[in-house]
Each structure stands twice: as C-alpha cells, then as structure tokens.
Image (cartoon, grey):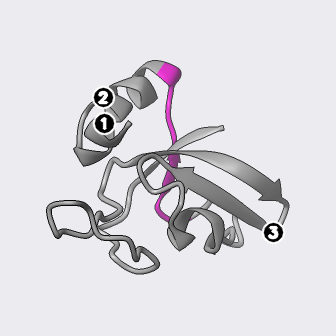
C-alpha cells in the first residue's frame, strides 16, 4: 500500500549522510510503501531511505480508532506525483 508522511520533518532513525554532507530527512509529503502490516503495527519503506532504520527498524502503531498518525493513504496519481518531487526523486 502506498502512503505519504503527513507529519512534520523527522530526522530520527536516519544515519547515512549524503555525498554533500547533509543527512536526508523524512519530510511532509514524503512517499513510502507499507512493506509489513500486522493489525497492531505497520512498517513503511520510505523512498530514498530504504537502507535507513526509519524504513526497516521503526514502525507505526494504530490509534484506538484504527488510523495511523502521520500516515496518509493517497490515490496512485497523487503518490506518483509525490515520488517525482523532493530530494528522494533525485536519489532514485
């Protein structure tokens, strides 16, 4: 399932600096794919951050109403557009 990050900029659980000396961050509107889903937890692989702990070592737990804070499910066209903009588009 394709999702986007709806939260604020997130710098935790990202360790590898880029060639220009900066560290990539998870940004509002950042596209990702749910790669593991259990009723109580999902793991999202974020574009450009596939090798970072934020993609494989951190998950998201549902709220009591079943929604996931800061994760938004969007139509394919909107996700495709999000994948084409931002620093992660250049990393692909």
Residue at 45 percent of width and 57 percent of height: 49
Q: CA distance from mark 2 to mark 3?
A: 31 Å
Residue at 16 percent of width and 69 percent of height: 21
Image quarter of the N terminus: top right
Decide: marks 1, 2 in contact (CB < 8 A)?
yes
Q: Secondary structure at mark 1?
A: helix
Q: Which is more toward the observer, 68 or 26?
A: 26
Q: Is residue 87 left or right of residue 77?
A: left
Q: CA distance from mark 3 to mark 1?
A: 31 Å
Q: Secondary structure at mark 2?
A: helix
Q: Which is more toward the observer, 33 or 68?
A: 33
Picture coordinates of residue 34, whole percent (x, y): 66, 48
Picture coordinates of residue 8, whole percent (x, y): 30, 67
Residue at 64 percent of width and 65 percent of height: 56
- Lower position in the chain sequence, tag 2 or tag 3: 3
Label ID, residue 40: 3
Residue at 23 percent of width and 42 percent of height: 86
Disc number lying in front (2 or 3):
2
Q: Which is more toward the observer, 12 or 23?
A: 23
* Residue 64 colored in magenta in the image: no
Label ID, residue 89: 1
Residue furthest to the top = 77
**Within the image, what quadrant is residue 67 found in?**
bottom right
Residue with the mark numbered 2: 84
- Lower position in the chain sequence, tag 3 or tag 1: 3
Picture coordinates of residue 3, whole percent (x, y): 53, 43
Q: Secondary structure at mark 3?
A: loop
**Within the image, what quadrant is residue 88 found in?**
top left
Q: Is residue 35 left or right of residue 6?
A: right
What segment carries the magenta color?
69-76
């Amino acid at each position: 399932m394709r999702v986007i990050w709806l939260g604020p900029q997130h710098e935790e659980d990202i360790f590898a600096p880029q060639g220009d000396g900066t560290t990539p961050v998870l940004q509002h509107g950042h596209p990702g794919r749910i790669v593991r889903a259990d009723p109580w937890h999902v793991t999202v692989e974020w574009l450009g951050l596939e090798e970072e702990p934020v993609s494989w070592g951190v998950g998201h737990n549902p709220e009591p109403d079943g929604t996931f804070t800061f994760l938004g499910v969007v139509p394919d066209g909107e996700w495709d557009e999000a994948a084409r903009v931002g620093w992660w588009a250049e990393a692909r």
